[in-house]
Amino acid sequence: MKPKYQVIIDDIKSHILSGTYSIGEQIPTESALQESYNVSRQTVRKAILELSNEGFLRSEKGSGTYVSNQYRSRAGGNTSKKTIGVITTYISDYIFPSIIRGIERRLNEDNYSLLLASTNNDVAQEKKALEMMLSYGVDGLIVEPTKSNLYNPNIAYYLSFKEQDVPFAMINAFYEELEVPFFCLDDVQSSYLATKELISKGHTQIGIIAKMDDLQGKYRMKGYIKALGEAKLRFHPEHVLSFDTASKTDLSANVTAYLQENREALTAIVCYNDEVGLEVVHACRQLGISIPDELSIIGQDNSYIAKNANIRLTTLTHPQEQMGRDAADWVIRKLQGKKDLPTQTYYQPELVEGETVKEMEIE
C-alpha cells in the first residue's frame, strides 16, 4: 500500500500533467488537502515539499502554493540531445520489436534518444506512461493507442502535449476523437483481401475471429463484411467470434468451442492476426481438423511467428519496421520545423501465400 503522502503526490502530479491544474494556478490550501485526503498537516506538507523539490509546485510565503513548470527544464533540460518518447501496447511480442527497431534506427541517424514504455493495452498503464513522458519533458512522442476502439479516458494528457507544442504521431491505430497524424496499415483492405482470396478459391462459408476493443479489429471486420457483400454472400453473426484484451486469455478455449460449433458450417476462417491464426491451427490439431483440406485459414500481419511456425500460414503483409521508421521521421521533421507533413499514412497490404488455404472442390 502506498504511503498517504505518496497518494497526494501522485494525484497532484496527475492534475498538473493532464492540465486540470494550469501552470501558475494556486492549488487547494493545506487545510483543504488535509480534509480531502483525511491526513495530518505534516503529511500534506511532506507531499508539497516533495513536489516543490521536483519542480511541480512553488510556495509563496503568506500567499499559497502554485503550480510550476520547473519540472520540464529539470527533466529534459540537462542535455542538448533530443528525446523521443515511444509508447506501444507491447514491446517484446509479435510485430512490436520490428516496429521499435524501425523507430530506433531512424532516431539514431539524427542522434535522438528513445524513451520507451508499454501499456499492455491497459488505460491505467497508458496514463502512467503518458505522465512519465510529460514529467520527463520528451521533445516528441510516438504512440500506439490503447484500446483504440473504445473511449479513452486519457485524452487530456494528449491535449497537454498539444498545448506544449510537443509533436506526436500515432501508429497502428488512432483515437478517432483526436485530430492526430497517424501511420496505419489499411486494415479494411487487409481483411477484405483475405476474405476475397478465400472467395476466389470457392469458399462461401467463411468465418472471422476479430479483436473488437482495438480499431484494427473494427476495420478488419469491416473489410470482411465488404468482401462478403460484393460476392453476394450472406453475413452470418454466428460465424463471428469476437474477443478483446480482457478475454484474450480465454481465446484458446473459445476458439476450440467455436470450431466445434461451426465444424460442419465453415470451410474457411479469416483471423484477426497471425497469432490468432496459429491459435486456430493449434485447436484444429487438437480436434483432428485437417488444414487446409477441411478448413482454410488466413492470418494477417506477416509476423515472424507466421514465418517460423511449423505450418506456413497464408497471411497479409504489415509494414512493421517501415512504419516505425516513417513515424520517427515525421516527428524529427516536425521538430526541424518542416511544414506540410502528411496527416494520414496508410500502407497497402499484399497477400503472402502459405500452405493454409485450399481451393474448394466443386462437387
Image (tube, rainbow, N blue to C red):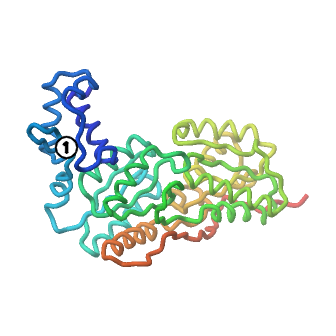
Q: What residue is drawn where x is 31% and y is 55%?
A: 116
Above or below, comparing residue 289 to residue 337 in the picture: above
Which quarter of the rendered picture does the C terminus lie within?
bottom right
Quarter residue 46 falls in: top left
Relative to 251, is 288 on the left or the right? right
Please state the horizontal and vertical placement of residue 15, each as a whole percent of the image.
31, 42
Secondary structure beneath label 1 = strand
- Coordinates of residue 227 in the picture (x, y in percent): 75, 61
Quarter of the image for residue 251 reads: top right
Residue 158 at what x, y percent from top left?
A: 39, 54
* Quadrant of residue 72 within the rendered picture: bottom left
| Residue closer to the observer: 303 or 354 | 303
Q: Residue furthest front?
A: 62
- Number of numbered discs overlaid on the protein picture: 1
- Nearer-the-camera pick, 319 or 130: 130
The structure residue drawn at horizontal position 35% and vertical position 61%, both measured from the top left corner, is: 141
Q: Residue at x 48, y 57 (%)?
A: 178
What residue would you read off at disc 1?
66
**Quarter of the image where the N terminus is located:** top left
Image side of residue 26 versus residue 175, left or right: left
Judged left or right of residue 277, residue 55 is left
Q: Amino acid at mark 1?
A: Tyr
Report the side of 286 relative to 1 (left or right). right
Q: Nearer the viewer, residue 162 or 279?
A: 162
Q: Residue at x 51, y 70 (%)?
A: 345
